[in-house]
Image (cartoon, rainbow, N blue to C red):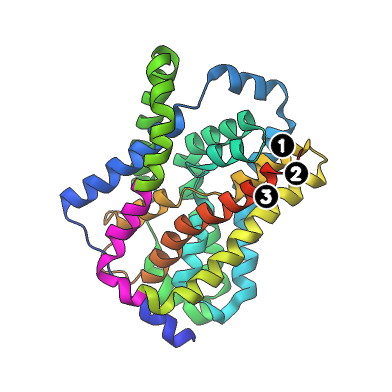
Amino acid sequence: MYEELLALDPVRINFSASGMNIINIILSFIMFGVALDIKTGVLLQIFRQPKSYLIGLISQLVALPLVTFLLIILLGNNITPTMAMGMILVASCPGGNISNFISSLSKANTELSVGLTATTTLLATITTPFNFAFWGGLYVNYTSKHASHVLQPLIIDNAQMFETVFILLGIPLILGIVCAKYLTMLTQMLRKPIQILSIVFFVAMIVLAFANNFNLFLKYIYFVFAIVFIHNFLALFTGFGLATLFKLPHADRRSITIETGIQNSGLGLVLLFNPKIFPPNLALGGMLFITAWWGVWHIVSGLSLAAYWHRKQC
């Protein structure tokens, strides 16, 4: 199976300049929608009662990458190095754009969810490059006898990643926050349509990316599905377990579970598509497949969990 999965690596997804612009606009649109839910008063209230907020940040920024690394070590040669690095990239991304919507369906603490999504997104310019470099570096060192020749080229330009993340996330967030504060009526009109369009556009982005490799996607989807299923389940379990360990209110436990399990894999895809960060000569198909399928599956798992929790009182 290991040798068969290596067939994923040569898959290349090359976009023209106009194609990359479309992808970047889609992600910026999604992040603008996230920012429409951010209210400074909500964030101040969270800061006054910071326990759940801090546990949520630790769960997503520290515990999830750690659990991901341990899972990769446990899986060993059952996954390829690029699939492992794809898992690390997903775990390094901030909270996903639909987590707030799923939290509201789950009868969770939506304000906490919004605060965590906003904070991890704002911190992503630092935490995404750092976590990818740190945990990816540990993985390279751990597997150096077996995979260093494969992973050595995966030394990325962190300054370029910082710049890209800031442009794609920082600017849309600022515009969204300003719109929410000063154009209240417009924000109320835009919020729900943008939430729906964000999901549609994200799925369209994945379809656009893999249209020329659909047969290969179908051939290996069962194994990619299994890896992403386990990874996502552990992410959700990590959030719930950590929140339960610290005896947080039940609504807060739900929020932290969702925030830890819903990752902005769209950002991961945009970074992978950027030739200045990941040069086109690198064979990174395994990373692409893991990151793309996570973006589809976390919607399914998140909505399924929301349907279960919606019927249960906190």
- Numbered disc in front, either 1 or 3: 3
Q: Nearer the viewer, residue 120 or 187?
A: 187
Q: Amino acid at mark 2?
A: Ala
Residue 77 image position (x, y, % from top left): 55, 81
**Residue at 39% from the left image edge and 79% from the top image edge:** 219
Is the magenta region chiefly helix, strand or loop?
A: helix
Residue 22 image position (x, y, % from top left): 23, 46
Instruction: Give residue 51's mark.
Output: none
Query: 10 Å neighbourhood of mark 1: few (<14), some, or many (≥20)?
Result: many
Question: Height in image: 221 above or below 51?
Answer: below
- Residue range in magenta is 201-216
Cα gap from disc 1 to disc 2, whole angstroms: 8 Å
Query: 10 Å neighbourhood of mark 2: few (<14), some, or many (≥20)?
Result: many
Quarter containing the C terminus: top right
Tell me, yes or no, whether the two marked residues, 1 and 2, touch with CB atoms within 8 Å. yes
Residue 205 falls within the magenta-colored stretch: yes
Q: Amino acid at mark 3?
A: Tyr
**Residue at 29% from the left image edge and 71% from the top image edge:** 213
Residue with the most extreme front position: 311
Q: Which residue is mark 3?
A: 308
Cα gap from disc 3 to disc 2, whole angstroms: 19 Å
Question: Height in image: 248 above or below 138?
Answer: above
Residue with the most extreme top position: 182
Instruction: Give residue 252's mark.
Output: 1
Cα gap from disc 1 to disc 3, whole angstroms: 16 Å
**Residue at 45% from the left image edge and 62% from the top image edge:** 293
Q: Secondary structure at mark 2?
A: helix
Q: Is residue 48 left or right of residue 26?
A: right
Instruction: Give residue 243's mark.
Output: 2
